[in-house]
Image (cartoon, grey):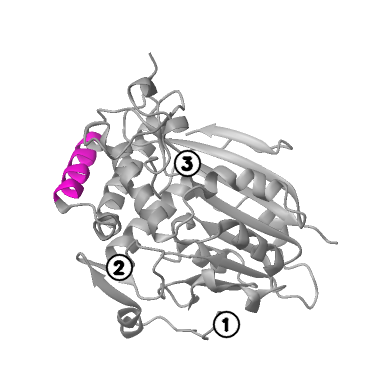
C-alpha cells in the first residue's frame, strides 16, 4: 500500500486539494544543454493610479491594515499573507537558503545583464519583491543596471507600490530581465501575467519564474492529497489543504506551478526554455548532512509560514480552534521530523525571441 492509499486521490478530489506557498531547493549540479532538470535537495507606476513611494515607516503604515494580529496589505483582496517585519524576516532567511541551494541567478542572466551594449542601460524588474533581498542583490551585483521592484507594500528604496493584477503596460519594452518568485497566491490570472512579462521584456531578454504547487510529497515524490473534512495527521499537508481552498476562494492562482512548463514552452514570444524541479525536505529527517541542515532551515521557514498563514485561514472562515490545532500539530510534526516529506519548487526561465 502506498502512502497515498489511505487518503483521497487527486482524481476524486478537487476543492480540497492540499497546497501552500514557500520554498524548497537543493544544490543544483551543473546545468548543461538539457532543458529539463530535477534535483533532490526609476520607479514608475502604471496601473491605473500612479503610486511610487520611497521607503518610510509612515508610508508602510498607510499601506497595511491589521487583520488577526498581522499587517496585511491595503491594495489587494487576493493576496492575504502579511507584510510586517516578522514576515520580512522570514523572507530574508528564505532568500539566503535559496541562494545556498540553487544560486541567485540562472546562468543566462550574467551575460544578459553585462554592461556591454553602448548607450543601453540594462534593467531588471522583480515582480512581487517581498522583502527585496533578491533585487537588492541585483543592484549590488550589477551596479550599472536599473533595478526596479514592485510589491503591494513598499519594502525597500527600490520598490514601487502597485498591484500587478492591474497590468504592466507602463513597463512594456523596458527590461532585460523580469523575475517573479512564489507570487501565484496573489495573482488572479497567471497566464495573463506571463503574457505581459513577454511584452515587458526587450528582445533577447530573460524571464525567470519560480513557483511551487502548494503540496507536500512523500520521500518517493508522490503527491499527498488530503481533504478538509478530517482533522488528523499528516498535519503539514492537512494545513495545506485548507490553505489551498482559502487562496482559491480569494482569487489566487493555486495551480500555476503545474502549468508553468506548458505555458512558457508553448508561448509564441519565448524560446530556449529551461525547466527545473527542486525537491527539498521539510524537516531534518534526511541522513545526508547537507540535506539534513537544509531540512532544518526549511522546517523553520514552514513553521514561520504557518504563523503567516493564520489571517489567510481565519479570514476564509476556518474556526480559530481548528487553525490552532492544525498549526500546533504541524509545528510539532516538523520540529520532531515525525513525518518524512518533501516540497517541490519549479523554476523555468526562457528568452524573448528577437522577432
Magenta segment: does it hold 84?
no
Asked if residue 137 can be seen in this view, the reply is yes
Residue extent of the magenta highlight = 321-333
Which numbered disc, 3 or 2, marks the residue that appears first in the sequence?
Answer: 3
Residue found at x 58% / y 53%: 209
Q: CA distance from mark 3 to mark 1?
A: 33 Å
Question: How many dots with numbers?
Answer: 3
Mark 2 or mark 1, earlier in chain: 1
Q: Which residue is mark 2?
A: 84
The crowding category of the residue bearing disc 1, from other C-alpha atoms within 10 Å (few below 14, some 14 to 19, many at least 20), is: some
In the image, taking residue 48 as reference, residue 245 lies left or right, namely: left
Q: Position of residue 52 (x, y in %)?
A: 49, 84
Q: Nearer the viewer, residue 171 or 139?
A: 171
- Label 3: which residue? 25
User: At 60% from the left edge and 71% from the top edge, which residue is drawn?
Assistant: 143
Label 2 Cα neighbours within 10 Å, binned few <14 / some 14-19 / many ≥20:
many
| Residues marked 2 and 1 touching at CB (< 8 Å) | no
In the rendered image, which residue does mark 1 sit on?
A: 44
Q: Is residue 65 rendered to the left or right of residue 29? A: left
Discs 3/2, front: 2
* Secondary structure beneath label 2: loop
Q: Secondary structure of the magenta portion, mostly? A: helix
**Percent position of residue 329, x then y:** 19, 38
Amino acid at each position: 500500500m502506498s502512502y497515498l492509499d489511505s487518503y483521497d486521490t487527486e482524481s476524486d478530489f478537487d476543492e480540497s486539494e492540499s497546497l501552500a506557498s514557500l520554498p524548497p531547493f537543493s544544490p543544483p549540479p551543473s546545468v548543461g544543454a538539457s532543458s529539463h532538470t530535477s534535483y533532490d535537495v526609476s520607479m514608475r507606476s502604471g496601473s491605473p493610479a500612479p503610486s511610487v513611494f520611497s521607503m518610510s515607516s509612515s508610508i508602510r503604515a498607510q499601506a497595511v491594515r491589521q487583520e488577526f494580529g498581522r499587517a496585511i496589505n491595503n491594495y489587494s483582496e487576493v493576496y492575504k499573507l502579511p507584510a510586517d517585519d516578522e514576515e520580512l524576516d522570514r523572507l530574508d532567511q528564505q532568500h539566503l537558503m535559496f541562494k545556498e541551494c540553487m544560486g541567485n541567478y540562472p546562468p543566462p542572466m550574467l551575460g544578459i545583464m553585462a554592461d556591454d551594449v553602448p548607450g543601453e542601460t540594462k534593467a531588471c524588474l522583480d515582480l512581487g519583491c517581498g522583502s527585496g533581498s533578491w533585487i537588492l542583490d541585483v543592484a549590488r551585483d550589477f551596479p550599472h543596471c536599473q533595478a526596479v521592484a514592485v510589491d503591494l507594500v513598499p519594502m525597500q528604496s527600490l520598490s514601487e507600490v502597485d498591484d500587478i493584477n492591474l497590468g504592466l503596460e507602463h513597463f512594456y519594452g523596458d527590461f532585460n530581465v523580469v523575475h517573479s518568485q512564489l507570487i501565484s497566491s496573489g495573482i488572479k490570472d497567471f497566464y495573463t501575467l506571463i503574457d505581459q512579462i513577454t511584452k515587458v521584456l526587450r528582445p533577447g531578454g530573460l524571464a525567470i519564474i519560480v513557483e511551487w504547487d502548494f503540496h507536500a510529497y512523500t520521500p518517493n515524490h508522490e503527491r499527498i492529497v488530503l481533504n478538509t473534512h478530517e482533522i488528523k495527521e499528516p498535519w503539514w499537508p492537512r494545513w495545506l489543504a485548507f490553505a489551498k481552498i482559502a487562496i482559491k476562494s480569494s482569487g489566487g492562482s493555486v495551480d500555476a506551478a503545474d502549468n508553468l512548463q506548458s505555458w512558457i514552452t508553448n508561448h509564441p514570444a519565448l524560446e530556449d526554455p529551461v525547466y527545473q524541479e527542486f525537491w527539498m525536505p521539510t524537516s531534518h529527517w534526511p541522513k545526508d548532512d547537507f540535506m539534513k541542515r537544509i531540512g532544518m532551515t526549511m522546517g523553520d521557514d514552514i513553521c514561520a509560514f504557518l504563523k503567516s498563514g493564520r489571517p489567510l485561514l481565519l479570514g476564509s472562515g476556518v474556526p480559530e480552534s481548528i487553525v490552532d490545532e492544525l498549526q500546533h500539530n504541524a509545528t510539532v510534526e516538523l520540529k520532531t521530523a515525525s513525518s518524512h516529506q518533501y516540497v517541490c519548487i519549479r523554476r523555468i526561465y526562457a528568452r524573448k525571441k528577437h522577432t
